[in-house]
Image (tube, helix red, strand yellow):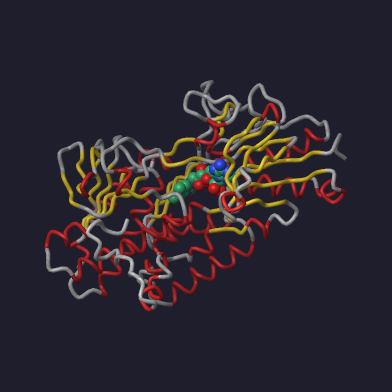
Amino acid sequence: MVKERARILIVGGGYVGLYTALRLQQKLKPELKRGEVEITLVSTEPYMTYQPFLPEAAAGSISPRHVVVPLRRVLDQCRILIGEVQSIDHAKRTATVTTLATEEEGAGAEQITYDELVLAPGSVSRALPIPGLADYAIGFKTVEEAIGLRNHVIEQMDIASSTRDPAIRDAALTFVFVGGGYAGVEALGELEDMARYAARYYHNVRPEDMKWILVEASNRILPEVGEEMGKYTVTQLRRRNIDVRLETRLDSCADRVAVLSDGARFPTRTVVWTAGVKPHPILAATDLPLNERGRLKCTPELTVDGVTHAWAAGDAAAVPDVTAAESGKETAPNAQHALRQARVLGDNIAHSLRDEALETYSHKYVGSVASLGLHKGVAHVYGRKLKGYPAWFMHRVYHLSRVPTFNRKARVLAEWTLAGLFKREIVSLGSLEHPRAEFELAAGGKPPLDPKLDPKGSS
Ligand SMILES: Cc1cc2nc3c(=O)[nH]c(=O)nc-3n(C[C@H](O)[C@H](O)[C@H](O)COP(=O)(O)OP(=O)(O)OC[C@H]3O[C@@H](n4cnc5c(N)ncnc54)[C@H](O)[C@@H]3O)c2cc1C
């Protein structure tokens, strides 16, 4: 039984948003039924994205629909609002939200009042002011980016196959990835693997014609799996003819030429930016305390420091790591923490509403698994190091156990099983991004420029 009626507002429908809401649905079931508690979740998308599956979605091993979890179906006790929180005035317990209807209505943004706030907008790509980056590069955080990149890579192979100009062919077959964390390494590993396979269906594109380049500013990649496994990954990628450049930065990609700090220049139509994340900019539009890196200052109980009725977790939150030997360390922005923090957060809101003691968030990072393409992987979990097929298999088992809902687990497993029986899909559906093109042409309108023929390229 809660002390008094509570309206809970959750901002963000990612790991933390989804799992916190699920936990609250479970813990506050009777209160929700009696109408004593109301949960509203605001998210820019109607689904949660299981980001660790994005590289496999880009490779075509999992269809895009199955790497996302529909919020309305899973959170049937919550009010789901698809929109963007623009600002939060916590002193007044009010959030300003715009939705798809806001502009059409012309009545201005919606004001949502609440009693308890859960702030979980995650992070955004940490882009640097590098010439050409904003114009030509693409990130790798969303399902749209992953599928867009897949289509783009196959399109580049089509361009290379059809052009008579060696310079165009060379640029089309050069793929530059910046950032050696799991997003960059897995995306590169999976896409290179897919492109290598696809090349067998082109009469004039061979795997050795393609240049895949990984640029990393530090002296190691995949810090998540430890130093030894990171070194192993570099060796494996180089054996696949992938050009791994450590202690190197991207200085420019203006005019579609990637210029690296070691002096190398690569004309290219593909620059993928995965060089880290920063907290979501919405945090700056609140009256809540942020640390020097823009994350919300939090307590180990997942309350926002020095503020009542505000909670946070995940990539947006600076949560003290109580398991660390040195003081002042924060939990890293990853799914392992986001998922576990969300459970404690849900429990603590229920405790707080019932006037019970709060739990402390305590979890020691257990390591990580990464896929480097079909049947290739690397893992360092609970002190155990695995390479190649066993690591790849472990990656699949681990993520299958983690992806939310039985429905998604079953669909992903079915896809993997079917993929083992049939040949890989190598088709590009980039034209899906222009669904009216065909009809506009038939109706006599001006057809949009075919991205393949666009001198500026398609991404
Ligand atoms: C390619 C890739 C692979 C990864 N692989 C791994 C892995 O193998 N292991 C691992 O531990 N971690 C992995 N991660 C990291 C992990 O996915 C993140 O740490 C985790 O998603 C963080 O959860 P979160 O809830 O804080 O943020 P998110 O899951 O990003 O959710 C944030 C949500 O908030 C919404 N939102 C943002 N702003 C607003 C707003 N103004 N109004 C309303 N809604 C808003 C967003 O649309 C999104 O739905 C990977 C990340 C990427 C990109």
Which residue appears at 34% of the width and 55% of the height? 189
Which residue appears at 58% of the width and 63% of the height? 409
The quarter of the picture where the C terminus appears is bottom left
Residue 324 appears anywhere in the view: yes
Which residue appears at 75% of the width and 53% of the height? 77
Instruction: Choose top left, top right, bottom left or bottom right for residue 357.
Output: top right
Residue 449 x/y as whole percent:
29, 65
Q: Is residue 369 left or right of residue 1?
A: left
* For residue 304, above or below residue 182: above
- Nearer to the camera, 299 or 189: 299
Q: Is residue 192 left or right of residue 70?
A: left
- Nearer to the camera, 81 or 387: 81
Residue 294 x/y as whole percent:
50, 29
Q: Is residue 200 left or right of residue 292?
A: left
* For residue 451, above or below residue 384: below
The quarter of the picture where the N terminus appears is top right
* For residue 233, above or below residue 171: above
Residue 215 x/y as whole percent:
27, 43
Residue 336 appears anywhere in the view: no
Residue 163 x/y as whole percent:
16, 68
